[in-house]
Image (cartoon, rainbow, N blue to C red):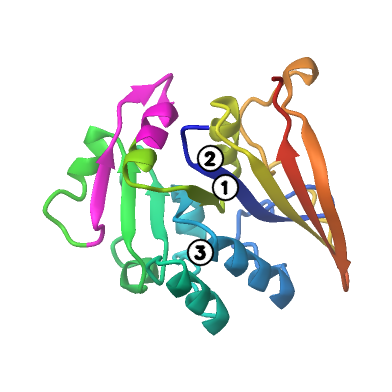
Amino acid sequence: MGRSHTTVVLAMSADGKIADYQRSPARFGSPTDKAHLETQIALADAVLFGAETLRAYGTTLPIRQEKLLEQRQQQGKPPQPVHIVCSRSGKLDANYPFFSQPVPRWLLTTSEGAEQWDGKPGFDRLLTLPSKDGGLDWQAAFQEFSLAGFERVAVIGGGTLVASLLEADLIDEVWLTVCPLLLGGRDAPTLVEGEGFAAKLAPHLELLSVEAIAQEVFLHYRIQRVA
């Protein structure tokens, strides 16, 4: 494939919302869902999430399960994958608990966004990209990921980032946890934000597995591509 294998991992309500209309932190997933997310993160070399996701939670999810840490050690990987925040502006609160969590931190941003952090602690690397169509150049980003040796990337939010990566055809798999609640609201974010896709151009999915655990359903899809 020549680039990092990319998997989206998100929980959503039964009506497809990944947060409520106030964009509060989505904590409606069960402990089983959290363990599932941690397992997917443990498979990755890098974890990708947007600035709004960081602003909502203030944190990321480090790997804590001993068996997952041992698994990474056996594979010759560092204890934690690189956690990469995507923000064109770079305007992030340095007091977020994220900046004291025991994970490697990168900022994926523009040259203007990098100026916000130049010479300041917080990020181990500032990855500066050119803008493209008002956003980040994702093809350039994934070239940098390949150069860094990232074979697998996990995307953990939010909908704007997922939409951008889908549009750039950079997503390979999707893990969705369907949680037993209805959030509703025209302003509540969904899995894929932005302008959306016309039906004839929409990415199609191949269902790989379905598992119901208690009140949640775990869906695993692969993005279908025309050969």
From this view, report whether residue 227 is shown above or below residue 2: above
Looking at this rendering, what residue extends furthest in the bottom direction?
A: 66
Amino acid on which disc 1 is placed: Gly
Q: Measuring from the top left, give residue 167's x and y in whole percent.
A: 58, 26
From this view, report whether residue 78 is shown above or below residue 204: below
Q: Are marks 3 and 1 in contact (CB under 8 Å)?
A: no
* Residue 127 belongs to magenta span: yes
Amino acid on which disc 2 is placed: Leu
Residue drawn at the location 21% of the way across and 46% of the way down: 116
Q: Which residue is mark 2?
A: 161
Q: Which residue is mark 3?
A: 57
Q: Of circles 2 and 3, which is in front?
A: 2
SS at badge 2: helix
Cα–Cα gap, marks 3 and 1: 12 Å
SS at badge 3: helix
Residue drawn at the location 53% of the way across and 65% of the way down: 42
Residue drawn at the location 18% of the way across and 42% of the way down: 115
Q: Quadrant of residue 222?
A: top right
Q: Nearer the viewer, residue 1 or 131?
A: 1
Residues rendered magenta in the picture? 122-143
Few, some or many residues within 10 Å of mark 2 (<14, 14–19, 20+): many
Compared across the picture, whether 163 is left or right of 198 comes to left
From this view, report whether residue 16 is shown above or below residue 211: above
Q: Are marks 2 and 1 in contact (CB under 8 Å)?
A: yes
Q: Measuring from the top left, give residue 44's x and y in whole percent.
A: 50, 57
Q: Is residue 189 visible?
A: no
Q: Which residue is mark 1?
A: 158
Looking at this rendering, what residue extends furthest in the left direction?
A: 119
SS at badge 1: loop
Q: Earlier in the sequence, mark 3 or mark 1?
A: 3
Q: Nearer the viewer, residue 142 or 77?
A: 77
Q: Earlier in the sequence, mark 2 or mark 3?
A: 3
